[in-house]
Amino acid sequence: MNFTMNFRKANEDDLPAIVRLLADDELGSKRERNTEPLPADYYEAFAAIEAQVGNQIILAIDDQTVIGCLQLTIIPGLARQGMKRAQIEGVRVDKRYRGKGVGEALFKEAIVISKSEKCGLVQLTTDKRREEAHRFYNRLGFLASHEGMKLIF
Amino acid sequence: MNFTMNFRKANEDDLPAIVRLLADDELGSKRERNTEPLPADYYEAFAAIEAQVGNQIILAIDDQTVIGCLQLTIIPGLARQGMKRAQIEGVRVDKRYRGKGVGEALFKEAIVISKSEKCGLVQLTTDKRREEAHRFYNRLGFLASHEGMKLIF
């Protein structure tokens, strides 16, 4: 399988492709509503992301096809002498493109942006059931130094 | 010890008191620079927090004294049908006021704000060495369902 890989910031027209990726996942399939047309909630959420300085969805693209996505949020804070942190959420790679370095390339793109924004670290939380993901993040240099705690309403 | 407890959003004049709290901590003491005047980095970071929609520092106040702080960031996202998440960083309580419910009250304030902003969850990462903090978060209903992974530059 030959493919090209480019990266760009998502725009509203990409939402159906992004939600398809979010839903095509063992845990995500129960959480998303991948209908046509998409529920308005996704469009409202995208507008809110666009309205927040430092928040963006980054896409990996093969030709015109969205093959991977992640959300990168730059969060300024006071701790560690006013260090900014980059946070990653919602990482997905199209099943047909797994094992081909797409996730790694997406992360490297996010890390380049985070460094250019003067972040001191990149952080994420990953479900303890996603063991394969943990190995992937370890290979990229992430350490599981923290507990990721959630209070779901 | 009698004291009152009120909550409010931090402003720039609170920075020396906040950095004093951030530095007065086993892990934080190595990471902060609590000089007088404060390094300009803290003022720049506070301005960046103020400029980001959804990002704020919440203080617990006894009379005029800052006795606790946390950073609350509302992050819009696409996953889980466009669910917003609230993220907490930089939680500190003045040592003289520990064990008196200040941290719990601060969290309850942050949770009220998060619900009013229609967040679906509150999340945080906590250093695996902070065992006492884990018990505190568990009591508030947080579950350590995720690994908190960091890539420090």
Image (cartoon, coloured by chain):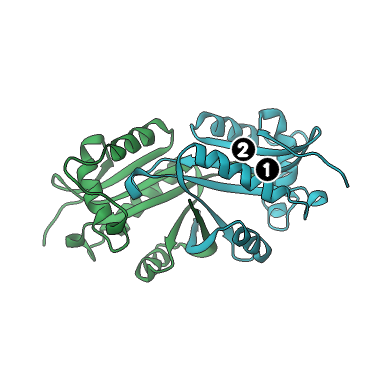
Chain colours: A green, B cyan
Please say if the residues under marks 1 and 2 sit with CB atoms less than 8 Å apart. Answer: yes
Q: Splitting the image into 4 quarters, where does residue B109 fall?
A: top right
Q: Neighbour class for label 1 at 10 Å: few (<14), some, many (≥20)?
A: many
Which chain contains the residue that carries disc 1? B
x and y percentages locating residue B71 in the rendered image = 60, 42
**In the rendering, which numbered label is found on residue B22?**
none
**Position above or below: A95 against A33:** below
Q: Is residue A80 visible in the rendered structure shown here?
A: no
Relative depth, front residue between B16 and B119: B119
Question: In the image as oriented, which residue stretches furthest toward the left?
Answer: A1
x and y percentages locating residue B57 in the rendered image = 62, 37
Rendered residue at 87%/44% (across/down): B2
Q: Earlier in the sequence, mark 1 or mark 2?
A: 2
Q: Is residue B54 visible in the rendered structure shown here?
A: yes
How far is mark 1 from mark 2, CA to CA? 7 Å
x and y percentages locating residue A17 in the rendered image = 20, 46
Type of the residue with mark 2:
Ile
Is residue B46 found left or right of B15 in the rendered image?
left
Kind of element beneath mark 1: strand
Rendered residue at 59%/43% (across/down): B110
Rendered residue at 19%/46% (across/down): A35
Q: Neighbour class for label 2 at 10 Å: few (<14), some, many (≥20)?
A: many
Is residue A84 found left or right of B134 in the rendered image?
left
x and y percentages locating residue A120 in the rendered image = 53, 48
- Residue hosting label 2: B57
Kind of element beneath mark 2: strand
**In the rendering, which numbered label is found on residue B69?**
1
